[in-house]
Image: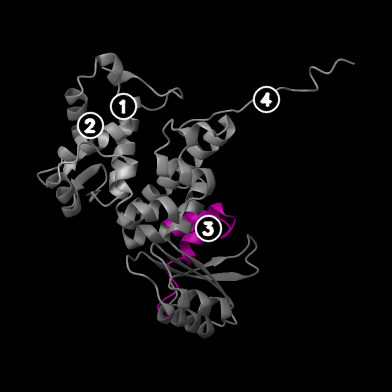
Amino acid sequence: MAIPDYESLMLPLLKRLEDGAIRVLKDVMAELANEFALTPEERAQLLPSGGTLTFASRVGWAKTYIKKAGLVTQPKRGMVQITPLGQEVLKQAPPALSSKFLERFDAFQEFRNGSSSGVLALSLSTGGGDDASTLDLTPDEIMETAYRKSVLVLADEVLDRVKACSPAYFEQLVVQLLIKMGYGGSREEAGRAVGKSGDGGIDGIINEDRLGLDAIYLQAKRWEGVVGRPEIMKFVGALAGQRANKGVFITTSWYTQDAKEYAGNSQYKVVLIDGPRLADLMIEHDLGVSVAATYQLKRIDSDFFADD
């Protein structure tokens, strides 16, 4: 049979996890390939880019969508487990799962709407299928939609990996990111600065430029809970204690509106970077990610065909 699309894989994937055990995703993927009686050729089929197995890609997207709906979780890298909500869905015995079905869950709606707009929102709401709305898109719009959707999911995976790392590794990750962004001089200089400034609400210091003409003070918090105004007040107080005027507070979670307003109204220059922004910056500066495929969109060269 033909390789099933990712929506067709959602329910079979969830059923494979029904007992609640933590499973290795690759093992579940192999079971699904057997369930759908895929031939050796179909199992080895690659995407047009040649870098990823088609079936693995579709299982991955199925996992991502039901995870965003809160039906499964990934407790460890490469592992997957059903949630109580996922088990409740199976008890309802739905004939199939789809992006439309997942819209009933608030978590999926937040994923679909929170970071998307325009054609991306359309793609997430329709599942990227060939319905009438999608067919109205131009090829360029479809390509842009696919790219933005891929980046959105990648950012979520990057943030999951960051949250799973140790506090010490997180500090070093922050160092590497700032260096890639042009701060801190050399890797050695930045490594000496971060994590060695003592207590008082400062996790590190890094040069703003390669000459060290000014310094930026850092607070790096690998948190799950939201960061409120009190934490930012402590950080600003620490800046005052160091006679510093610039600081960056980086967290893997989010900031309350009150915290943002306090930082914005402070006499000190305080930049707040939350988890989603951190993931975006890592992708933008190629930290923790690599290029899987490159596509070139080509158009007619009018000058070449100019008949002088």
Name the quadrant containing residue 124.
top left
The three-letter amino acid code for the residue at tag 3 is Leu
Q: Earlier in the sequence, mark 3 or mark 4?
A: 3
Q: Earlier in the sequence, mark 2 or mark 1?
A: 2
Q: Quadrant of the N terminus?
A: top left
Q: Could one spot residue 272 in this view of the protein?
A: yes
Q: Nearer the viewer, residue 162 or 211?
A: 162
Residue at 41%, 82% in the rendered image: 230
Q: Which mark is residue 55?
A: 1
Q: Quadrant of the C terminus?
A: top right
Which range of residues does the magenta coloring cover? 173-200
Q: CA distance from mark 3 to mark 1?
A: 37 Å
Disc 2 is placed on an element classified as: helix
- Asked if 264 appears above or below 114 in the picture, the reply is below
Q: CA distance from mark 2 to mark 1?
A: 8 Å
Q: Earlier in the sequence, mark 2 or mark 3?
A: 2
The three-letter amino acid code for the residue at tag 2 is Met
Residue 122 painted magenta: no
Q: Nearer the viewer, residue 303 or 193?
A: 303
> Where does residue 37 sit, x and y in percent of width and height?
19, 19
Residue at 79%, 17% in the rendered image: 305
